[in-house]
Amino acid sequence: MAFEDLDAEIAYLLDVMEGELGDLREIEFRLQQVISTMRAEGLPVPEDLKNLEAKLDRLLQGK
C-alpha cells in the first residue's frame, strides 16, 4: 500500500472518530490493518497511532 493510501486511511479514521459516524470496533479493526500494513512494508508506526490503538483497546474492553 502506498504511503499516500495509508495517510488517507488514517485521516479517514480520525474523521470518523471525531464525528458520530462509525463503530468503534470497525475503527479499531481498520486501524489495526493500517498498522499491520505499515509494519509489513517496513515503515515505522508513529507513536500516536500506537497510543490510539491502545486507547481503543482499553475502551472496548471496558478498562
Image: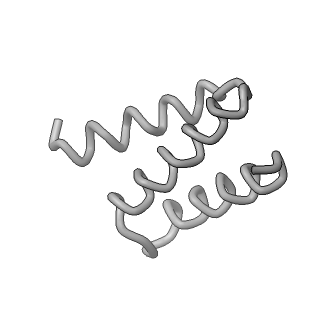
Depicted 60 relative to depicted 19: above or below? above
Vertical side of 13 occupied by 31: above or below: above
Left or right side of 36 for 38: right
Query: Residue at the location (74% across, 59% down)?
Result: 8
Taking 30 as reference, is 56 above or below it? above
Q: Residue at x 55, y 38 (%)?
A: 36
Q: How is the image coloured?
A: one colour
The foreground one among 42 and 19 is 42
Write the residue at 62% across / 30% down.
39
Total marks placed: 0
**Of 30 and 60, the residue lying toward us:** 30
State which quarter of the image contains the C terminus.
top left
**Residue farthest to the bottom, as pictured:** 21
Occupied quadrant, residue 41: top right
Q: Is residue 38 left or right of residue 63?
A: right
Give the residue at the far left of this rendering: 62
Taking the spot 44% from the left edge, 38% from the top edge, the residue there is 53
Could you say where residue 2 lies in the image, as x and y percent from the top left? 82, 49
- Closer to us: 57 or 38: 38
Classify 9 as above or below 16.
above
Q: Position of residue 30 (x, y in %)?
A: 49, 55
Q: Measured from the top left, where is residue 5 in percent x and y?
A: 77, 56
Image x and y of residue 25, in percent: 33, 58
- Left or right, residue 48 beside residue 19: right
